[in-house]
Protein backbone atom coordinates (compact mmCIF):
# COMPACT_ATOMS: atom_id res chain seq x y z
CA UNK A 1 0.00 0.00 0.00
CA UNK A 2 1.57 3.28 -1.17
CA UNK A 3 4.90 1.50 -1.62
CA UNK A 4 5.45 1.17 2.14
CA UNK A 5 6.35 -2.03 3.93
CA UNK A 6 4.97 -3.25 7.24
CA UNK A 7 7.75 -1.73 9.34
CA UNK A 8 7.43 1.63 7.62
CA UNK A 9 3.66 1.64 8.16
CA UNK A 10 4.19 0.97 11.88
CA UNK A 11 6.61 3.90 12.13
CA UNK A 12 4.14 6.21 10.37
CA UNK A 13 1.32 5.04 12.66
CA UNK A 14 3.53 5.55 15.75
CA UNK A 15 4.38 9.10 14.67
CA UNK A 16 0.70 9.88 14.08
CA UNK A 17 -0.14 8.42 17.49
CA UNK A 18 2.51 10.55 19.20
CA UNK A 19 1.55 13.76 17.40
CA UNK A 20 -2.23 13.57 17.68
CA UNK A 21 -2.79 11.29 20.65
CA UNK A 22 -4.95 8.19 20.91
CA UNK A 23 -8.20 10.11 21.41
CA UNK A 24 -7.91 12.03 18.13
CA UNK A 25 -7.26 9.07 15.81
CA UNK A 26 -10.91 7.83 15.72
CA UNK A 27 -12.10 11.38 15.02
CA UNK A 28 -9.60 11.71 12.19
CA UNK A 29 -10.60 8.33 10.73
CA UNK A 30 -14.28 9.30 10.90
CA UNK A 31 -13.58 12.61 9.15
CA UNK A 32 -11.53 10.85 6.47
CA UNK A 33 -14.36 8.38 5.88
CA UNK A 34 -16.91 11.18 5.53
CA UNK A 35 -14.64 13.07 3.14
CA UNK A 36 -14.18 9.97 0.97
CA UNK A 37 -17.94 9.35 0.96
CA UNK A 38 -18.61 12.95 -0.16
CA UNK A 39 -15.95 12.67 -2.86
CA UNK A 40 -17.48 9.47 -4.23
CA UNK A 41 -20.94 11.05 -4.15
CA UNK A 42 -19.72 14.09 -6.11
CA UNK A 43 -17.87 11.84 -8.55
CA UNK A 44 -21.02 9.75 -9.10
CA UNK A 45 -23.14 12.88 -9.66
CA UNK A 46 -20.68 14.24 -12.22
CA UNK A 47 -20.56 10.89 -14.03
CA UNK A 48 -24.36 10.71 -14.09
CA UNK A 49 -24.54 14.25 -15.44
CA UNK A 50 -22.08 13.47 -18.22
CA UNK A 51 -23.80 10.23 -19.25
CA UNK A 52 -27.34 11.55 -19.01
CA UNK A 53 -29.11 11.57 -22.35
CA UNK A 54 -29.94 15.09 -23.32
CA UNK A 55 -33.03 15.68 -25.48
CA UNK A 56 -32.26 16.85 -29.02
CA UNK A 57 -32.44 20.58 -29.59
CA UNK A 58 -35.68 21.77 -31.14
CA UNK A 59 -35.20 23.06 -34.61
CA UNK A 60 -37.52 25.64 -36.11
CA UNK A 61 -36.37 24.78 -39.66
CA UNK A 62 -38.43 21.56 -39.93
CA UNK A 63 -41.73 22.92 -38.58
CA UNK A 64 -44.60 23.29 -41.06
CA UNK A 65 -46.14 26.73 -41.28
Image: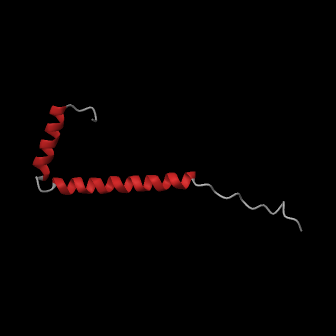
- Residue sitting at x 27%, y 32%: 3
* Quadrant containing the C terminus in the rendered view: bottom right
Q: Position of residue 56 (x, y in %)?
A: 70, 57
Residue 6 drawn at (x, y percent): 18, 33
Percent position (x, y) of residue 59? 78, 61
Please state the horizontal and vertical placement of residue 44, each as a whole percent of the image: 46, 53
Kindly identify the residue that appears in the image at 14 percent across and 52 percent down.
20
Q: Does residue 43 appear to the left or right of 29 in the view shown? A: right
At 49% from the left and 54% from the top, the residue drawn is 46
Q: At 88% from the left edge and 65% from the top edge, which residue is drawn?
A: 64
Q: Quadrant of the N terminus?
A: top left
Is 42 or 21 nearer to us in this picture?
Answer: 42
Which colour scheme appears in the figure?
secondary structure
Res 24 quadrant in image: bottom left
**Is residue 45 positioned above or below 65 on the image?**
above
Image quadrant assignment for residue 49: bottom right
Left or right, residue 1 beside residue 65? left
Amino acid sequence: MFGLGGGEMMIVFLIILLVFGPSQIPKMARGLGQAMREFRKAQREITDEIHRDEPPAKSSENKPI
